[in-house]
Image (cartoon, rainbow, N blue to C red):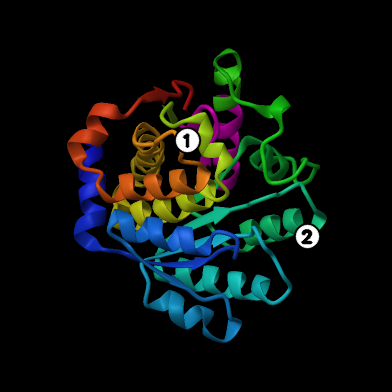
Amino acid sequence: MLKEYLKNVRDSHPLIHNITNYVTVNDVANILLACGASPIMADELEEAEEITSICNGLNINIGTLNSRTIPAMLAAGKKAEELGHALLLDPVGAGASRLRTDTALKLMENIQFDVIRGNISEIKTLAKHGGHTKGVDADASDEVREDNLAQAISFIQTFAEETGSIIAVTGAIDIVANKTIAYVIQNGRAEMGRITGTGCQLSGLMTAFLAANRENSLEAAATAVSVMGIAGEIGWNHMKPEDGNSTYRNRIIDAVYHMDGDTLERMAKIKKIENKKN
């Protein structure tokens, strides 16, 4: 089944509008091209709605916020929602500053996102409508582990029900859930955390999967997480002793480029958990 969602991306070549942070914008563009989608980046208010109108999905990433781009995010988001396009919010660093937290909450209040994707600390900040984190990385005290997995799933599903969005929490153990179903994914490598932007890349990749699989948003989002994690594993297996994190970044993108359905199905470590109470 996973291979079908990948095939749909490659067959439909969705055009994805990214209002994303300038630290990783090139990597986001390349990961989209690698999976078969097409990227476009436009954060000027004067053209944000127009660009969104010609796209299939919108990826909003608040990693390098400024007062000029916030109105563009709101305008593009409202237009994408009006047109029924795939919509994803990546609340990078929510909790690190009041501006980031307030902006993420404002976007959520004004736009109905298909998916909100972040690390567990960012998601907890939004669920509590405030709070503080150490930066853009998840706090170790919030880490999802085997011993607190059930509790984490319950929290994420409650937040999914409150927001009406799919919640994707990524870390050592990834969880993608709506209010009734959770997918637990355990692909990837710890070394992926040494590269700036793997989360940003995943948000772009996930938006493409959402755009190409509108009737199966939850499964598409979970598949995107698996694809990224598997690419991390394959990329690491191709590393040479003299290679470092810059090479690893490129090998991950190459692994997505060469990903096929059979490899995806064979390597995916994904488990479906249903909430019997709903």
Closest to the observer, 91 or 129: 91
Task: Name which residue type carries label 1.
Answer: Ala
Tell me, yes or no, whether the highlighted magenta stretch contains residue 167.
yes
Nearer the viewer's eye, disc 2 or disc 1? 2
Q: Is residue 51 above or below residue 127?
A: below
Q: Which residues are magenta?
A: 154-180
Closest to the observer, 66 or 278: 66
Q: Is residue 86 visible?
A: yes
Task: State the image coordinates of residue 246 (x, y, percent, origin top left).
Answer: 50, 49
Residue, far front:
242
- Neighbourhood count class around disc 1 (C-alpha, 10 Å): few under 14, some 14–19, many 20 upward: many
Q: Are marks 2 and 1 in contact (CB under 8 Å)?
A: no
Quadrant location of residue 236? top left
What number is the disc on residue 88? none
Task: State the image coordinates of residue 139 (x, y, percent, origin top left).
Answer: 71, 33
Closest to the observer, 33 or 203: 33
Task: State the image coordinates of residue 111 (x, y, percent, origin top left).
Answer: 57, 62
Q: Secondary structure at mark 1?
A: strand
Task: Name which residue type carries label 2.
Answer: Leu
**What residue is rendered at 54% in x and 28% in y?**
172
Q: Is residue 118 above or below residue 16?
A: above
**What residue is rendered at 44% in x and 32% in y?**
188
Quadrant location of residue 142? top right
Closest to the observer, 234 or 78: 234
Residue, far top:
147
Mark 2 or 1, nearer chain start: 2
**What residue is rendered at 28% in x and 51% in y?**
257
State the residue position of label 2.
Answer: 99
Task: State the image coordinates of residue 72 (x, y, percent, origin top left).
Answer: 60, 75
What number is the disc on residue 177? 1
- Neighbourhood count class around disc 2 (C-alpha, 10 Å): few under 14, some 14–19, many 20 upward: some
Q: Is residue 165 visible?
A: no
